Image (cartoon, grey):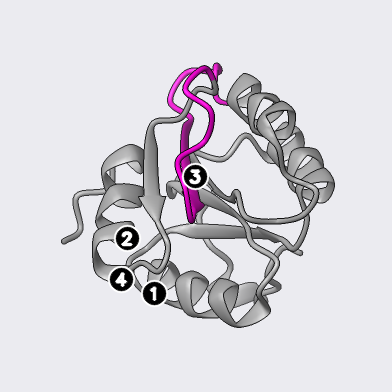
Amino acid sequence: MNRSYPESSRPDSTQPSVLLVEPSSEAREVLATILQLRGLRIFEADEPRHGLVIARAERPDVIVLDFDQPCVDDGVQNDFAAETRHPNTGLIVLGNSPPHRQAQTDRFVAKPFHYGPLVQAIERLAGNKAA
């Protein structure tokens, strides 16, 4: 789901953008709030197929994919990696164990994670130096 904004507070399309593909609405909400406060545009999906649709339509600067979903495997991760072959798109994978070595990611973040280092990794990939 893409967040909706009142007309006066709509994010600028030149802001770096992040797609959060995370089944936990609580984790998405916390991370989305932190990133919005740091000046990033946020797109959200609760499952990978919806995330791929958003990734193809919006071309976010960074995709954060929770790898520990029942429907996520190396094939799904590789679909997301294909989306990040476009210039300036990064892929961060969250999970309990690293993905298969052949699956391409910019960063793996082990669960449980602290939001601070994850936010810093997202900002680095997005080119946002607000830290």
**127 left or right of 46 in image:** left
Pick the quarter of the image with the C terminus. bottom left
**Does the residue at mark 2 contact the one at mark 3 (Cβ under 8 Å)?**
no
**Marker disc for residue 34:** 1
Q: Secondary structure at mark 4?
A: loop
Find out whether residue 88 is within the magenta segment: yes
Label 4 amino acid? His
Name the residue located 26 percent from the left edge and 43 percent from the top edge.
124
Q: Give the CA separation, mark 4 to mark 2.
A: 9 Å
* Mark 3 or mark 1: whose residue is earlier in sequence: 1
* Mark 1 or mark 2: whose residue is earlier in sequence: 1
Q: Quadrant of residue 74?
A: top right
Residue 76's spot in the image, x, y percent? 73, 33
Camera-near label (4 vs 2) is 4
Say which residue label 2 marks. Answer: 119
Name the residue located 50 percent from the left edge and 55 percent from the top edge.
12
* Mark 1 or mark 4: whose residue is earlier in sequence: 1
**Does the residue at mark 1 contact the one at mark 2 (Cβ under 8 Å)?**
yes
Mark 2 surroundings within 10 Å by alpha-carbon count, few (fewer than 14), some (14 through 19), many (20 or more): some
Camera-near label (3 vs 1) is 3
First to last magenta residue range: 84-102
Camera-near label (2 vs 3) is 3
Pick the quarter of the image with the N terminus. bottom right
**Marker disc for residue 93:** 3
Mark 4 surroundings within 10 Å by alpha-carbon count, few (fewer than 14), some (14 through 19), many (20 or more): few
**Marker disc for residue 114:** 4
Q: Secondary structure at mark 1?
A: helix
65 is higher (above) or lower (below) than 130: above
